[in-house]
Amino acid sequence: MPRYPRKYSKTGIYHIMLRGNERKDIFIDKQDKKKFIKTVIQKKADEAFKLYAYCIMDNHVHLVIKEQKEPIPRIVKKITTSFAYYFNNKYKRVGHLFQDRYKSETIEDEPYLLSVIRYIHNNPEKAEITKKEKYKWSSYPNYIEILRKTIELPEIKEILEIFSLDTKKALKEFINYSNKHEEKNFLEMKKIIESEINEENVEEYIDEYLKSRSLKKENLKKRENVEERENLVQQLLRKSNFSRRKIAILIGVNREAVRKVSKEPSP
């Protein structure tokens, strides 16, 4: 497929997603996540850019960045080059760590900006990892702790001021907003998250999963392999937009087996 030229934001604000090369994990332990956050903070020094939000998952990262003194391509290159050097040195590896082409979308107005930040902060809950308040690897704690201690992202005050110039009132409204269900249809955002497992790569994903556990698809029905089956179902539910019925067909089990994992109520 041809590569289309990137769109440039009139506001200078972008939603950026960095993904591991070949969809591999780019954060192996907590130290890696700490290092990435430290890297981004260092690269935004001297007003190179503003960081309004971030969320670090195991194999990808979301960032909301506003250009200041440097353009977005240079910002992303500095961050990825620095972290890749650290990662490759630590794990004695060579080659690309991130996918060659990062994903980006422009943010042109305040309502969309707030919606993207809410979406990013809710990633840990969407992935059923933990509540966003308890997730250490996103900028959400910076927001909710702004009244209690010095924060590493002073620019988030600009986001809170969208709600109110009174910080205490703004924080309350921001938390309420963050807890609301997102009703907007993010077309560009949907493109970002829907492709992790899709029609083109799902069979390969399942084959690799089974191969890594020395299993065949028909083995998933056996009671002794229930843990492997449930883990595969969880991965497909979290990383794709497939229905439960579709997942059941793909892995050769009945829909009830998928329903139990998804905690969907019986019809």
Image: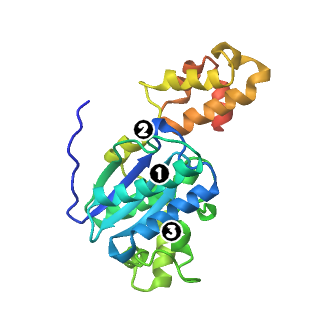
Question: Local crowd at mark 3 within 10 Å, few (<14), some, or many (≥20)?
Answer: few
Marked residue nearer the N-terminal end (2 or 3): 3
Tell me if mark 1 has few (under 14), some (14-19) or many (20+) residues whose alpha carbon lies within 10 angstroms of its own. Answer: some
Q: Position of residue 110 (x, y in %)?
A: 31, 67
In-image side of 211 versus 242 (left or right): right
Residue type for callout 2: Glu
Query: Residue beneath label 3, please?
Result: 176
Residue 72 image-quadrant placement: bottom left
Q: Which of marks 2 and 3 is in front?
A: 2
User: Circle 2 sits on which residue?
Assistant: 194
Visible residue check, residue 6: yes
- Dot 1 lies on which element? helix
Q: Which of 264 and 98 is in front in this view?
A: 98
- Give the image location of residue 165, x and y in percent: 39, 85
139 over 228 or under it: above or below: below
Residue at 56%, 32% (x, y): give it. Answer: 236
User: At 63% across and 36% down in the image, what residue appears?
Assistant: 262
> Which residue type does callout 1 highlight?
Ala
Look at 43% across and 86% down and name the residue there: 166
Instruction: Choose top left, top right, bottom left or bottom right for residue 229.
Output: top right
- In-image side of 161 versus 143 (left or right): left
Inspect the image, locate mark 3, and give the three-letter code of the amino acid beneath it: Asn
Helix, strand or loop status at disc 3: helix
Give whichever of discs 2 and 1 has the lower sequence position.
Answer: 1
Query: Which residue lies at the image location 74% right of the left edge and 26% below the top edge?
Result: 226
Q: Name the residue under label 1.
A: 84
Q: Up-down: is 15 above or below 209?
A: below
Q: Quadrant of the C terminus?
A: top right
Measured in 3D between alpha carbons, the distance from the residue under mark 2 to the one under mark 3, in whole angstroms, is 27 Å
